Amino acid sequence: MKIAVDAMGGDHAPVEIVKGVDIALQKFPDLEIILYGNEKLIKQTLTSKERVSIVHTEEKIYSEEDPVLAVRRKKDASLVLAAKAVKDGEAAAMVSAGSTGAVLTAGLFIVGRIEGIERPALAPTFPTANGKGVVLLDVGANAECKPKYLQQFAIMGSIYAEKVRGVKNPRVGLINIGTEENKGNDLAKATFDLLKESKLNFVGNVEPREILNPPADVLVTDGWTGNMVLKTTEGVASTLFKMMKETMTSDWKSKLAAAILKPNLKKLKKRMDYEEEGGASLFGIKSPVIKAHGSSDANAFYNAIRQAKIMAGVNLAEEISKAISE
Amino acid sequence: MKIAVDAMGGDHAPVEIVKGVDIALQKFPDLEIILYGNEKLIKQTLTSKERVSIVHTEEKIYSEEDPVLAVRRKKDASLVLAAKAVKDGEAAAMVSAGSTGAVLTAGLFIVGRIEGIERPALAPTFPTANGKGVVLLDVGANAECKPKYLQQFAIMGSIYAEKVRGVKNPRVGLINIGTEENKGNDLAKATFDLLKESKLNFVGNVEPREILNPPADVLVTDGWTGNMVLKTTEGVASTLFKMMKETMTSDWKSKLAAAILKPNLKKLKKRMDYEEEGGASLFGIKSPVIKAHGSSDANAFYNAIRQAKIMAGVNLAEEISKAISE
């Protein structure tokens, strides 16, 4: 299995990206990687000698750039070359920690949408208190949505949960401001009706109060709302952990107590760590496109590659095509 | 100053409500309270002898009821009577821990909207890491909004922050999925333009990642999004505190360490406690209507009364009328 990696995307590129590639190559003997980026810089870090090749390019996309213009104009950008490799069948999937907009654009316009899919969706696996995680979509590919799009998100999320995450008969929930059937804005109400009539295992509305303990395996919403829920969760969790840390270092007694608790608290923080879950997948695209977190370190990027590998091993596009046409 | 209190609303009514009233009467020698509800039950708890009266009624509104129908039909419900007292000028403000929908309906249809206000907004003061709090609106009065509504929310929030919370030249932020000017859905983009042109101290878009450290004193959004941000924050904070507690009681060493940290952790939890900030105000209504948290205990309800008292002491409706007509 060959995976294309954009070596130049993300805050810690290319060093942490390349280190993540090294880990992945060590763990998976059947994996091959093509790295796109500055060969000289990549080689400064890369330790793997086998199953890895570098396609040198000096062009890359910056996060401040307009993603659509950048992907169109910079034909030799590392991200664009990686996406082209997937399009041309040279690689089975691609991974980038570059800007979300650019990865979305490259996935949509270069790799291409699955026929019948109205809109692709960006879908991370969200950490939950029980450690099982929940697939949340869309978290930002589409700020404005129609009920039909959300219905397709539900189908894609359900297939992903079953085929990639191994959840039997995945429970699909609709994010809403109340649990009752008649709750919400116009979009939520219309989507509720579509999901209720579908063949999915629809469990009804889920309030974001339950985001870390959701009674569902897949949570569906529009990209605006999903992005709000995602960013609020990240913000609240990171601020609370920071405040906790301040509390625990405020005097010597607290420091002593914190030292005792440290191993358990580390475990807790890890359980709530997004990066352990890999990246966000772009659903509805012909081949797996994974957007790793911009701040990915080697381990986070390794997890994103692992996820791409699992996704490429299942023919998701075909499953999705079949389900959509039904 | 006379305040009308719905003694029968909330999960712990009337006991905790009445206890909260007792605290408020003790703390504020110039305060008078009219309690609406079951006299016999109220008297079982009430210790105050002076500056308090009870208007007996056996009718009350249940949280499962359709709020509009319930407020219309149950003319003698404790909430309805309290709202009528405000309308008739018998009380300067009202407080209820009843269902949000019913309090909204009573405020809107009985107390009445300020002329020129398109939609009232529900506005809690959100706790922040620095302890100063931020006024967030709307959190659920209007699931569907127009840019004009959000502009009015910004004006009302700004007046509240200045007159009630004592913030000079309050910074107003727009909740959005990115900080750049061109970000967001259609509503956010159009609202951005309106706020930019206004006389408000508009500081631009604020991502919900910063919800506990916001670079603003007032955060404006539609009721759907505000409710999402509010409930996500509540859910994540309460789950993390719970997980933290589990971690700290997992073995005897952790328990020992936790005992040392307890006083500081309690302080931290209190800093993040919504109930310390009083209730959510209904902005755009002729007199102050405060919705206390449904799970309010005596102290939380006391804080909501305190807030109503401060609000009634400032002529907000007039200030808002003036600003809107400009």
Image: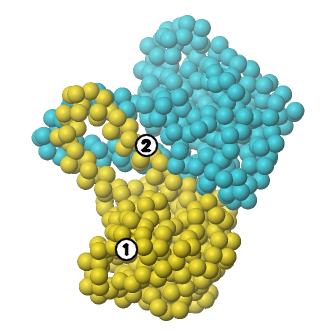
Chain colours: A yellow, B cyan
User: Is A323 placed left or right of B103 in the picture?
Assistant: left
Q: Position of residue B88 (x, y in %)?
A: 75, 23
User: Is A43 placed left or right of B151 in the picture?
Assistant: left
Q: Residue at x 58, y 79 (%)?
A: A76
Question: Mark 1 or 2 closer to N-term?
Answer: 1
Q: Which mark is residue A239?
A: 2
Please name which of the two marks, 1 or 2, marks the residue nearer to the observer.
1
Q: Position of residue B291 (x, y in %)?
A: 58, 34
Seen in the picture, residue B114 relative to A170 is either above or below; the reply is above
User: Is A46 placed left or right of B73 in the picture?
Assistant: left
Q: Residue at x 71, y 39 (%)?
A: B202
Compare residues B274 and A314 and report the one nearer the observer: A314
For disc 1, the marked residue is: A43
Compare residues B30 and B88 and report the one nearer the observer: B30
Tell me the CA gap for discs 1 and 2.
37 Å
- The kind of residue tagged 2 is Thr
Q: Is residue A17 visible?
A: yes
The chain under label 2 reads A
Q: Residue at x 61, y 37 (%)?
A: B216
Seen in the picture, residue A301 relative to B86 is either above or below; the reply is below
Disc 1 crowd, CA 10 A, few/some/many (<14, 14-19, 20+): some
Seen in the picture, residue B162 relative to A176 is either above or below; the reply is above
* Element class at badge 1: helix
- The kind of residue tagged 1 is Lys
Disc 2 crowd, CA 10 A, few/some/many (<14, 14-19, 20+): many
Q: Are marks 1 and 2 on the same chain?
A: yes
